[in-house]
Image (cartoon, helix red, strand yellow):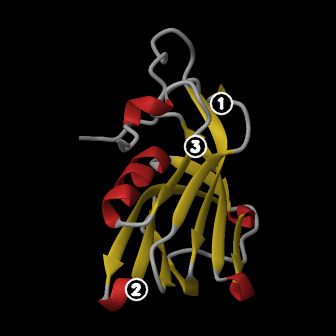
Amino acid sequence: MTQDATFEDGRESPLNLGAQDASDLQVISSLVQDSVFPITEMRWQAKQHRFALLLNRFRWEDGARNRHAPERVQSLLVLDNVVAVSSQGIDRSDTDLILSLLSVDFEPSEDGAGDLVLTLAGDGALRLRVEALDATLKDVTRPYVAPSGKAPGHPE
């Protein structure tokens, strides 16, 4: 019998997760919350129907944060089956722009197609039209101490 991975399973290991439905995507969305990335680290490969982001991801799953400084890790978020990409509230010509990812949501339409909405801090968003939901999140570096020295905070 196989069992789905849990949030706690990734505590000290590099993440390599996939999502093919909205509930799987919620797990990935929670793990990429507060990731930051330069605008230059997002790519749409139209011929391959792939959109990718190289994120500096906060390690929310790190169960040892009380024993060491908060950590980040570079991760690839790859979204496949992408047929169109649009943005709102982002100056794509500003190559010095640093973006902060708040969430990744799926808005289904018919036949498994739909829109992936990547909500960014500061009222920005990316909308990816997909033929089917297929997302992967993979850590590609070793964790490093978060430059701020603390976990991201959210006003309540």
Q: Label 3 sits on what residue type?
A: Arg
Looking at the image, which is closer to me, 29 or 86?
Answer: 29
Residue at the spot of label 3: 57
Find the distance from the CA under tag 2 to the CA under tag 1: 39 Å
Mark closest to the chain's N terminus, 1 or 3: 3
Mark closest to the chain's N terminus, 2 or 3: 3
SS category of the residue bearing label 2 = loop
In the figure, 92 relative to 39: above or below? below
Looking at the image, which is closer to me, 133 or 37?
Answer: 133
* Res 58 quadrant in image: top right
Q: Label 1 sits on what residue type?
A: Pro
Q: Residue furthest front?
A: 1
Residue at the spot of label 2: 113
Q: Quadrant of the C terminus?
A: top left
SS category of the residue bearing label 3 = strand
Q: Residue furthest left?
A: 156
Mark closest to the chain's N terminus, 2 or 1: 2
Residue at the spot of label 1: 147
Find the distance from the CA under tag 1 to the CA under tag 3: 12 Å
Q: Residues within 10 Å of mark 2 (few under 14, many from 20)?
A: some
Q: In percent of the image, x 73 and y 88: which residue is there?
A: 47
Looking at the image, residue 112 sits to the left or right of residue 17; the answer is left
